């Protein structure tokens, strides 16, 4: 017996729909659990109660959390994104050199005169500053 005749096309679509719905629910579940642990405004007992509610009544628990905490989830997500953006901006500021080449060469010349670096290191710094 052929598999194609025993598994009609509509059943394939139904299976795909069920699978897609399950994947979406898993994604929402992970988002809700991450938000529960990210919260700073609730105690550990409240977090445990939400997790227990989600485990005992999975679909209903997730949907109730989304209804009750939708505004807080949005605020916490925006706060997290803003914090990540600020950290990235701070990192870029520390890594990027804002000095112009003349200042870099002058600083290197001062280090050379003080004996902190030798002539070869001074030349490397000078070449790097002029290349930028």
Image (tube, rainbow, N blue to C red):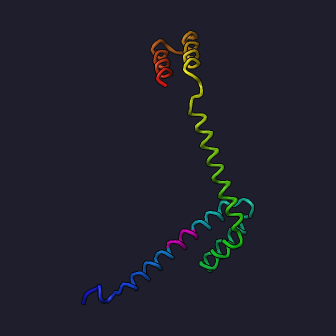
What is the total number of numbered labels drawn onto the structure image?
A: 0
Is 9 or 98 nearer to us in this picture? 9
Magenta region's main secondary structure?
helix
Q: Which residues lie in the magenta part? A: 23-29
Outermost residue to the top: 113
Q: Position of residue 130 (x, y in %)?
A: 49, 20
State the quadrant of the N terminus.
Answer: bottom left
What residue is rendered at 58% in x and 13% in y? 110
Outermost residue to the left: 1
Q: Position of residue 104 (x, y in %)?
A: 56, 20
**Does residue 7 appear left or right of residue 47 in this picture?**
left
User: Is residue 52 depicted above or below 95 in this figure?
Assistant: below
Q: Was residue 26 drawn as part of the magenta stretch in this picture?
A: yes
Q: Position of residue 5 (x, y in %)?
A: 29, 88
What residue is rendered at 65% in x and 74% in y? 52
User: Is residue 111 depicted above or below 30 in this figure?
Assistant: above
What residue is rendered at 55% in x and 73% in y? 25
* Quarter of the view holding residue 45: bottom right
User: Is residue 26 depicted above or below 123 in this figure?
Assistant: below
* Quarter of the view holding residue 66: bottom right
Q: Was residue 108 drawn as part of the magenta stretch in this picture?
A: no
Q: Position of residue 85 (x, y in %)?
A: 62, 47
**Does residue 44 appear left or right of residue 109 in this picture?**
right
Is 14 or 120 nearer to us in this picture? 14
Is 61 or 53 nearer to us in this picture? 61
């Amino acid at each position: 017996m052929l598999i194609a005749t025993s598994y009609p096309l509509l059943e394939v679509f139904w299976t795909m729909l069920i699978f897609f719905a399950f994947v979406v629910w898993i994604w929402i579940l992970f988002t809700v659990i991450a938000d529960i642990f990210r919260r700073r405004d609730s105690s550990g007992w409240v977090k445990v109660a939400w997790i227990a509610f989600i485990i005992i009544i999975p679909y209903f628990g997730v949907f109730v959390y989304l209804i009750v905490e939708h505004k807080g989830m949005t605020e916490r997500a925006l706060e997290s994104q803003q914090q990540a953006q600020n950290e990235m901006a701070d990192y870029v500021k520390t890594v990027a050199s804002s000095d112009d080449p003349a200042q870099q060469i002058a600083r290197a010349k001062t280090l050379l005169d003080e004996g902190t670096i030798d002539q070869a290191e001074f030349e490397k710094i000078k070449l790097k500053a002029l290349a930028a």
